[in-house]
Image (spheres, rainbow, N blue to C red):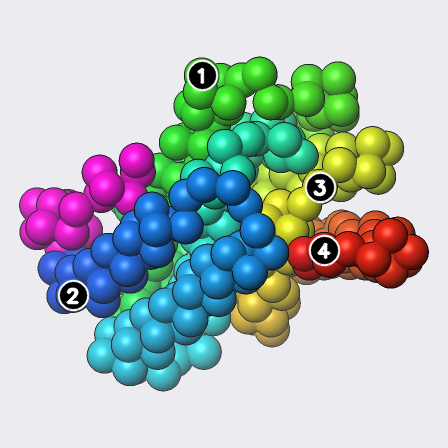
């Protein structure tokens, strides 16, 4: 299991040097691993809620510890917080696979686009500092959250192509993403900022921003056209939506900073437009998810059975 493989002493050898995070991360991963192992077996509503409550509780404790001891309170810490919530989103998918033994309802294409997004962004933030938070969490914590998200995302993809391949619904995951990926790189090339002194780093960051928004489309497509999702998948997209909102709150407030060395601030407007797209797509998913849950409520009330949100 990934949670068993990621032992925190390995952080002492990590290039990010975030050794101070070993204690809270050890508590989080160890407690979560034992809780999931203890709840293996036939899935029940109470067991699902117990695991979900544990994940959210431990995440809240970690966020408080990290921002208490590793942050100086700068507004740019919102970027790190958004990245941490995104990590939580992928962790919920990992818990889903571990608990249910299935990858049903998860879009492979969404995960692939998310992995590409994280690779592009890490290629910038681990080498250049133009788009890093000015808060002290931008020195190591932010990159660590992004790296953990990437490892989780790749692990999920690997298991969906091996262990849980039979449970993947390829027919439902039929959204065409090729043109979205091309469009993201075109926008990144034409409307990139100048916060890094290397052009390719600026292009990668802007492309990753648009890819991050487009990554939600295949999952929304799968749910809207096939009505296929569950509580864990809903938590994944819900956390991703909150992550976008948190990051948007910062970047849309400082979009004027992107007018550096340009006569018209088209990079700043591109950032704002990308986050508007992400928020609208997130709202669209939450609307479809709410309607689906309401239909399940009526069905459950009629049948006299319980359900999980």
Task: Tell me where the magenta segment starts and ends, as one range.
Answer: 1-17
Q: CA distance from mark 3 to mark 1?
A: 21 Å
Q: CA distance from mark 3 to mark 2?
A: 35 Å
| Mark 2 touches mark 1? (CB < 8 Å) | no
Q: Is residue 13 something that shows in the picture?
A: yes
Q: CA distance from mark 4 to mark 2?
A: 36 Å
Q: Which mark is residue 229?
A: 3
- Find numbered disc 2 in the image and state the secondary structure of the residue it sits on: helix
Mark 4 surroundings: few (<14), some (14-19) or many (≥20) residues within 10 A: few
Mark 1 surroundings: few (<14), some (14-19) or many (≥20) residues within 10 A: few
Mark 2 surroundings: few (<14), some (14-19) or many (≥20) residues within 10 A: few
Residue 288 image position (x, y, % from top left): 83, 51
291 relative position to 207: left or right: right
Residue at (44, 25) in percent of width and height? 159
- Find numbered disc 3 in the image and state the secondary structure of the residue it sits on: loop
Q: CA distance from mark 3 to mark 4?
A: 13 Å
Tell which circle, 3 or 4, labels the residue nearer the N-terminal end.
3
Residue 245 image position (x, y, % from top left): 63, 65
234 part of magenta stretch: no
In the picture of the structure, the residue carrying the numbered disc 2 is 23
Q: CA distance from mark 2 to mark 1?
A: 33 Å
Quadrant where the N terminus is found in the figure: top left
**Foreground pick, 115 / 183:** 115
Q: Which mark is residue 242?
A: none
**Foreground pick, 303 / 287:** 303
Residue at (71, 24) in percent of width and height? 173
Relative height, residue 239 to residue 100 (above, below) = below
Quadrant where the C terminus is found in the figure: bottom right
The mark lying in front, picked from 3 and 4, is 4
Tell which circle, 3 or 2, labels the residue nearer the N-terminal end.
2
């Amino acid at each position: 299991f990934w949670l068993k493989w990621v032992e925190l002493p390995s952080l002492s050898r990590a290039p990010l040097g975030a050794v101070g995070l070993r204690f809270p991360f050890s508590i989080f991963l160890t407690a979560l691993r034992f809780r999931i192992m203890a709840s293996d077996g036939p899935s029940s509503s109470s067991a699902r809620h117990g695991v979900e409550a544990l994940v959210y509780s431990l995440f809240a404790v970690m966020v408080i510890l990290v921002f208490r001891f590793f942050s100086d309170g700068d507004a740019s810490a919102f970027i790190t917080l958004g990245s941490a919530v995104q990590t939580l989103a992928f962790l919920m998918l990992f818990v889903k696979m571990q608990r249910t033994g299935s990858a049903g309802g998860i879009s492979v294409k969404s995960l692939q686009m998310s992995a590409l997004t994280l690779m592009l962004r890490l290629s910038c933030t681990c080498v250049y500092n133009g788009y890093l938070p000015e808060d002290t969490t931008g020195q190591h914590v932010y990159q660590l959250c992004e790296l953990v998200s990437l490892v989780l995302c790749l692990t999920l993809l690997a298991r969906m192509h091996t262990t849980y391949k039979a449970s993947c619904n390829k027919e439902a995951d039929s959204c065409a993403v090729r043109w979205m990926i091309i469009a993201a790189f075109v926008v990144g090339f034409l409307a990139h900022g100048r916060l890094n002194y290397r052009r390719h780093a600026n292009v990668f960051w802007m492309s990753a921003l648009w890819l991050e928004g487009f990554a939600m489309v295949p999952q929304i497509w799968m749910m809207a056209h096939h009505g296929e999702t569950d509580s864990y998948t809903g938590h994944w997209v819900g956390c991703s939506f909150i992550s976008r909102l948190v990051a948007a709150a910062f970047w849309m407030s400082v979009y004027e900073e992107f007018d550096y060395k340009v006569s018209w601030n088209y990079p700043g407007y591109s950032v704002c437009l990308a986050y508007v797209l992400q928020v609208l797509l997130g709202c669209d998913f939450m609307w479809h998810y709410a309607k689906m849950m309401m239909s399940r409520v009526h069905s459950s009330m009629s049948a006299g059975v319980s359900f999980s949100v």
